[in-house]
Image: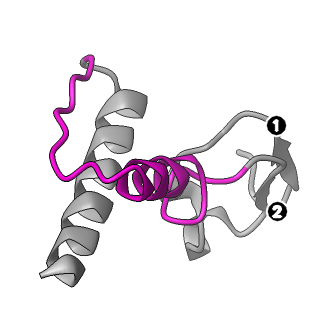
Amino acid sequence: GLERIPQVSPTSTSAKLSGTGEYRYFSRTVAPDDGSGQVGAMVAMLRSLGWNRVSILTTDTAYSKDFANEFRRLWLVREEGDK
């Protein structure tokens, strides 16, 4: 297996790879798809433009499902904060 071998990815953005003991030797050169990365920036931009409703269209892949789920989670968290 790949146990105890450092791995560096320039493209892996899945938040599932972050902060878990399961991937102790994994690192990336791009931000994860979470509140600190691309999804968080997208939600912040839409909120700053005054948007209060969005629709999410996704494909049936792990990447797009994770991205959409994280977007939904962040959108609803920030929506609750606006009330």
The residue closer to the viewer here, 66 or 39, is: 39
* Quadrant of res 58: top left
**What is the distance, in whole Å, between disc 1 and disc 2 at their CAs?**
19 Å
Secondary structure of residue under mark 1: loop
In the rendered image of this protein, does residue 49 appear above or below residue 11? Answer: below
The residue closer to the viewer here, 81 or 16, is: 81
Residue bearing the label numbered 1: 10
Badge number at residue 4: 2
What's drawn in magenta, residue-wise? 31-59
- In the displayed structure, does residue 29 sit left or right of residue 43? right
Secondary structure of residue under mark 2: loop
Badge number at residue 74: none
Residue 29 lies, in percent from the top left, at 84, 48
Residue at the (48%, 51%) spot, across then down: 45
- In the displayed structure, does residue 77 sit left or right of residue 43? left
* Residue 50, magenta (yes or no): yes
* Residue 23, magenta (yes or no): no
Residue 24 lies, in percent from the top left, at 71, 69
Quarter occupied by the C terminus = bottom left
Give amino acid for label 1: Pro
Which is more N-terminal, label 2 or label 1? 2
Residue at the (42%, 31%) spot, across then down: 63
Neighbourhood count class around disc 2 (C-alpha, 10 Å): few under 14, some 14–19, many 20 upward: few
Residue at the (69%, 53%) spot, across then down: 31
Residue at the (39%, 48%) spot, across then down: 46
- In the displayed structure, does residue 53 sit left or right of residue 19? left
Neighbourhood count class around disc 1 (C-alpha, 10 Å): few under 14, some 14–19, many 20 upward: few
Residue 59 lies, in percent from the top left, at 27, 17
Residue 36 lies, in percent from the top left, at 59, 65
The residue closer to the viewer here, 21 or 1, is: 21
- In the displayed structure, does residue 9 sit left or right of residue 6? left
